[in-house]
Image: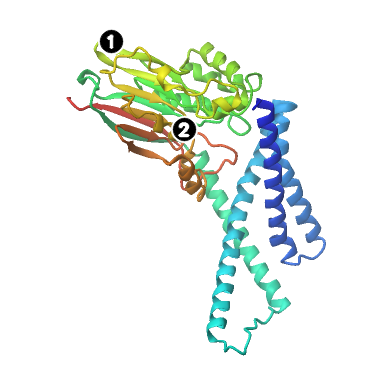
Amino acid sequence: MPRWASLLMFALTSVVILTLVHYYLWRRLVHDTELRHPWRRVVTIAIVLCGASIPLAMWTTRLVDARLGPHLGWPAFVWMGYQFLLFLGFLAVDVLRMLRWSARQGRALVQSTPASVPQTAPLDPERRRFFARVAGGTVATAATGTLAWGMREALKELNISEVAVTLPRLPAALDGFTIAHLTDIHVGNTISRGFIEGLVARTNALQPDLIAITGDLVDGDVPALAYAVSPLGELRARHGVFFVTGNHEFFSGVEPWVAELRRLGITVLRNQHVRIGEGDDGFDLAGIDDHDAGRFGGEGPDLAKALAGRDPARELVLLAHQPRQVLATDGHGVGLQLSGHTHGGQIWPWHYAARAQQGFLAGLHRYRDTQLYVSRGTGYWGPPVRVGAPAEIAKIVLRAARA
């Protein structure tokens, strides 16, 4: 499918979903609570404007002027997080109401005689309005508190997650080799140059032997975001800085971004491998394109091509954006795969959907002979909110089994 067609389909689907979600919120906050004028009109207009701000921010910065990003992005994406939390809260209330109604109906059926029909008295309008207002106030208060906490979690100083991984073929001379793993930074509407400068300083302070960036670096094209991304050229590691594509690079124009990152001195691995270390005291590092690259006219991930010509006796570390790409590693001798993409769920309970799609959510896993580390992400996508999934810089410490 052409890139423009995929983007158009995504845009139309997003608008339909957003419209339905905001209508649901209007029903619960305005209609059911029977708000009186002028509050009824004020809240209705606010819901409409806030809902419209999300596609406006996402597409105006792409199609009109990227400099509008920070001005439109912060209010739109904060609202995106808030409306998601409101939706979850009201959905939970409705599920509880449905369960309560089902239980009442079940009891009535059990207690009824063959000649009788269970009757449920309609709820008094005053009581219905009272319960709707209590539910609305409770959900809004809980969503506001969760939003504030989640924004604090998303915007605070990044955690350093140190993870030791023992690799059977790693030379003893490389025991303790460190990889700083960055992923899912999503430079764009609410993540700008200041964040990248801080990230570079924090990463360099770890003095890693190698830096790996596993995709979804940007949400926008090179002219719009080159200035914000440029501090990545200051990343320093003895064995270099390496990058593989994520799905958002294909949304944002992958070829110009590959050229820009290479201009910054970052090695982009697209179905390729390189040798790390000297002679026998080394390992191979491979990188493959994103799982969905083929949908956007790309070559797609090709592990066999990436590993062509390598010595299978050497240890192998693979960079792949999506965790599910580990399913293709069987028989290829991959000792460790580093991935991102899931954001660790970012906002609970999105954790369950991310795990269902990918099979892995976050942390260190094993798939047959391959160990897999899935980062929760270094930035965030969309809402500047993280609930139950703190961002991280992963410091991967490689251990040699023979050390």
Percent coordinates x, y for residue 145 in the rendering: 56, 54
Identified by mark 1, the residue type is Glu
For the question of whether residue 269 can be seen, the reply is yes
Q: Which residue is mark 1?
A: 278
Quadrant showing the N terminus: top right
Residue at 59% in and 68% down: 98
For disc 1, the neighbor class at 10 Å (few under 14, some 14 to 19, many from 20) is: few
- Nearest the viewer among 45 and 13 is 13
Identified by mark 2, the residue type is Gln
Front: mark 2 or 1: 2
Residue at 58% in and 88% down: 114
Colour scheme shown: rainbow
Q: Which numbered disc covers residue 322?
A: 2
Residue at 52% in and 39% down: 155
Q: Are marks 2 and 1 in contact (CB under 8 Å)?
A: no
From the viewer's perspective, tell me whether residue 238 is left or right of residue 15. Answer: left
From the viewer's perspective, tell me whether residue 353 is left or right of residue 222. Answer: left
For the question of whether residue 206 can be seen, the reply is no
Does 384 appear above or below 130? Answer: above
- Local SS, label 2: loop
- Nearest the viewer among 312 and 137 is 312
Quadrant showing the C terminus: top left
Task: Name which of mark 2 and mark 1 comes first in the sequence.
Answer: 1
Does 346 appear above or below 247? Answer: below
Q: CA distance from mark 2 to mark 1?
A: 30 Å
